[in-house]
Amino acid sequence: MSYSYYAHIIKRWAAILGLDAAQYGTHSMRRTKATLIYARTKNIRAVQLLLGHVKLDNTIRYLGVEIEDVLKISEDTDI
């Protein structure tokens, strides 16, 4: 599927739902999905893989996650 067709689908869905289509785009949907996955699972590595980020730091910045939050999750996880 091309980027422009995907963008068209997003805009059409927003319009059908009665939303301002200008407020929704492919990037906002990508970011929202990644944020929801992280919020539900706290698995930053899975989100990193899904986004295709090479560096974990990029994923942390992309999600707006504070490094202290990530370290706390890590510390709270027993192995």
Image (cartoon, helix red, strand yellow):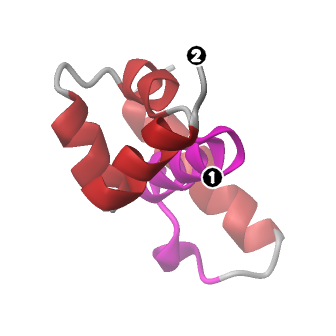
Say whether residue 64 is visible.
yes
Mark 2 or mark 1, which has the lower sequence index? 1
Q: Are marks 2 and 1 in contact (CB under 8 Å)?
A: no
Residue at x 81% of width, y 68% of height: 16
Q: Residue furthest right?
A: 17
Any magenta on residue 28? yes
Any magenta on residue 32? yes
Tag of residue 79:
2
Residue 11 picture location, percent across and down = 59, 60
Secondary structure predominantly adopted by residues drawn in magenta: helix
Residue 14 picture location, percent across and down = 69, 67
Q: Residues within 10 Å of mark 2 (few under 14, many from 20)?
A: few
Where does the magenta region start and end?
Answer: 20-42
Q: In terms of secondary structure, where does tag 2 sit?
A: loop
Q: Amino acid at mark 1?
A: Ala
Q: Residues within 10 Å of mark 1 (few under 14, many from 20)?
A: few
Look at mark 1 in the image and give the residue it sits on. Answer: 39
In this picture, is 50 found above or below 58? Answer: above
Q: How far apart in space, not on screen, are marks 2 and 1 (Cα)?
A: 21 Å
Question: Which image quadrant for residue 42?
Answer: top right
In this rendering, would 44 be left or right of 57? right
Q: Which quadrant holds the C terminus?
A: top right
